[in-house]
Amino acid sequence: MATMALCAAAAGAQQATNMEAMNRGVFSDTPAPPLPAQSGTTKDAAAKKRGALQPGTGDFYRFAKIEATPVSQEAGPMDLRRWTLSALVSKATGEVDFYVNHYEIYRASSWKALSVAQTDAGEGLKLGRLAARVVSCRSGCSYAEEIFIDLTPATVDRARTQPLRIQLSGLGANPTPIEIDAQVVNDLVAQAGVEAEKYRKVSAPAAAVMPVAAPVLAPPAAQAPAAAGPVSVADELQKLGKLRADGTITELEFQNLKGRLLAK
C-alpha cells in the first residue's frame, strides 16, 4: 500500500514539474524535423519576424508590428492552438506585410512538423518556422511549434469580404484549421494603413531632396508642345479609383498608391 502511495506521489510530482515547465516555456533542445527546402526570401522573412519581436535587434526598430486579437482553442493544458493576424509596417517606406502567426502545443507520438499552408480556395501560402521544441513527459511527449504564414495582397483583398480559412498540414497528422473573420482583416488593414501613413509622410521629404537628372531637351524644331499644366492630386485619385473599379488594382494596392499621392 505504501509503495502504491509513493508511486502515485511520484507521478503527481512529475506531472506538476511538466506543467510548470510548460507554463514557463522551458523546453528541451530536441530539434524538430527540418522544413522542406526554403527559398532565401522565406528564410529572410523568418529572421525579420523573429527580430521584430525582440527588443534590441535592428528589425525591432525598423518595423512597427500591429496585431489583431489572438484566437485561441484550448482542449487541455497540453492541447492548445492560438493564431494571430499580424502586420509589419516598414518605418523606412511605409510598406506593409501581412501574415498569420500560429502557435500550437499538442501531445502526440511524434512531430506534426507543420510545413504546408493552403486556403480553402486552393491557394498555397508560404510559411516559415519561428520555433519548435519538445517537452519530455513521463507518459508521452508534448510538442510546441510556432510558424508564420505569409499572406499575399490578393489573399488579404479576398479576406476582406469573406472569412480567411487556412489548412495546415505536416507529417501524417490531421490538418489544423485556421479561420479569421473578414471584419478582423478589415480592421487590421485600416490600422496598418494609418500606421503606414505616418512613415510615408516622414520619408516623403527625404525623397524630395534627392538629386534629379536634368531632362534632355529635343532640338527646337522637334520639341513637343508645352504641357497643358500639372495634373492635380484629385485627378490622380480619380484615375486610381477607376483602376480599382475596373479590377486592375486591388483595394490594398489602391490604399498604398493613395497614401503615396497624399504624402507628396
Image (cartoon, rainbow, N blue to C red):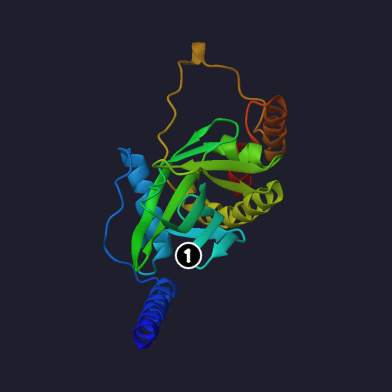
Identify the residue shown where x is 55% and y is 56%.
84
Location of residue 141 by image quarter:
bottom left
**19 over 58 or under it: above or below:** below
Q: Is residue 220 visible?
A: yes
Query: Residue at label 1?
Result: 78
Please tell me which residue lies in front, 28 or 137: 137
Q: Is residue 89 visible?
A: no
Instruction: Give the amino acid type for the residue marked by disc 1 in the picture.
Output: Met
Q: Secondary structure at mark 1?
A: loop
Location of residue 49 by image quarter:
bottom left
Q: Would you call the spot at circle 1 few (<14 residues within 10 Å), some (14-19), or many (20 or more)?
A: many
* Image quadrant where one finds the N terminus: bottom left
Please tell me which residue lies in front, 33 or 230: 33
Location of residue 153 by image quarter:
top right
Is 194 on the left-hand or right-hand side of 148?
right
**57 over 172 or under it: above or below:** below
Q: Can you give x and y, in whole percent of width and height, for residue 136 in the image?
A: 33, 66
Q: Can you give x and y, in whole percent of width and height, for residue 33 in the image?
A: 30, 48
Considering every residue shown, the one lying at the far front of the view is 1
